[in-house]
Image (cartoon, rainbow, N blue to C red):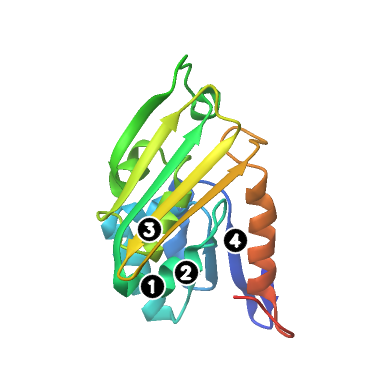
Amino acid sequence: MRRCANGVDLVVEVATSQAVVEFAPEILRYSDLAVFSSTAFADPAFEQLVSETCREYSRKVYVPHGAILGVDGLFDGRDVLEDVVITTTKRPENLGRTDSSKTVLYDGPTRDACKAFPRNVNVHACIALGGLGFDRTRSRIVSDPDSPGNSHLIEIKAKGCWFKIEVLSDPISGVTGAYTPVSACASIRRLLSTEGIVIA
């Protein structure tokens, strides 16, 4: 938390999407909020409630990029995006499964992926929020016992350009890769920065 003269002005959520749904509307009455469990916004009614609450109380909700890269470029080019696909590949045990061979668990709109895998696709929700939205962004979830780690492949087509980004990190706990806490801490430092040069 960051404290100002009148109390808390930033709350950082690193719990669950359920916690976001339960507490965000109340938090936003008093403070800005950084949300890592961004699958909460796959519920359109909740996303609208948060947007309305932010307008009413002049608050901001920050969605850090977490385990992936390139969200800034995605957001900057959102008006010319044509197709966005994100594929997450993890070992079966990191998905709560026991598959003995590579298995595609889901291939479809990100909105439904967030409902089916809320703890594993926060990066998908971040991509959807930054780009084409939950219904036009395509998610793929793959269980692969031979996967070297947690892999996120982002493939983007836009007018006049195309790019692909892949991030691979070792799983350090159930669903979290080694890059995520490094990224999370750096994002929070940027939000807390009050002086100097800040890379946005």
Q: Are marks 3 and 1 in contact (CB under 8 Å)?
A: yes
Q: Give the amino acid type for the residue marked by disc 2 in the picture.
A: Gly
Is 174 above or below relative to 44?
above
Q: Give the amino acid type for the residue marked by disc 1 in the picture.
A: Gly
Name the residue that disc number 2 marks: 73
* Badge 2 element: helix
* Badge 3 element: strand
Q: Are marks 2 and 1 in contact (CB under 8 Å)?
A: yes
Is 173 above or below relative to 157?
above
Q: Which of disc 1 and disc 3 is earlier in sequence?
A: 1
Give the spatial CA distance, label 1 vs label 4: 27 Å
Q: Give the amino acid type for the residue marked by disc 3 in the picture.
A: Ile
Tag in front: 3 or 4: 3
Look at 60% across and 34% down and name the residue there: 149
Tag in front: 1 or 4: 1
Q: Which of disc 4 and disc 2 is earlier in sequence?
A: 4
Q: Return the mark for residue 12.
A: 4
Q: Return the mark for residue 156.
A: 3
